[in-house]
Image: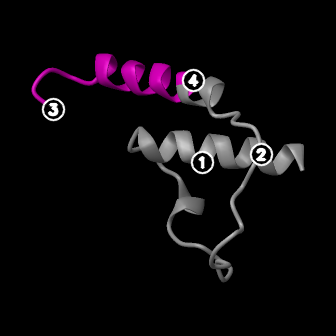
Amino acid sequence: MDEARKIYADEASAYVMDRRAPYTKELLFDVPQGGKEDLDKSIIAAPMAKQMAEKMEDVLNRPIGQ
């Protein structure tokens, strides 16, 4: 389960930063309706910070005018 959380956090962070995130294309299962809220803890802060840093590096290393 910890591996699944890490994959989710990495994929979601990459998606938000407009980076390659193949698992964010579509759900691969039916979504239950009503009363099925996810009460799990959030773990996205660290992966989001990592993706932000990588995105900034991409932008800063891009040739001028691109």
Residue at x 72%, y 55% (from the top left corner)? 38
Query: Which label number is shown at residue 66?
Result: 3
Above or below residue 51? Residue 9 is below
CB atoms of marks 1 and 4 within 8 Å: no
- Distance from disc 1 to disc 2, alpha carbons, whole Å, reads 17 Å
Which label belongs to residue 11? 1
Please give the residue where the numbered disc 4 appears in the rendered image.
Answer: 50
The picture places residue 3, in percent across and down from the top left corner, at 85, 46
Identify the main secondary structure in magenta.
helix
Give the residue displayed 30% in from the left and 16% down from the top: 60
Give the image location of residue 42, x and y in percent. 69, 36
Distance between the Cα atoms at labels 3 and 4?
Answer: 23 Å
The dot on residue 40 is 2
Q: Position of residue 57 (x, y in %)?
A: 41, 19
Q: Amino acid at mark 3?
A: Gln
Judged left or right of residue 41, residue 47 is left
Amino acid under disc 2: Asp
Mark 1 or mark 4, earlier in chain: 1
Q: Nearer the viewer, mark 4 or mark 2?
A: 2
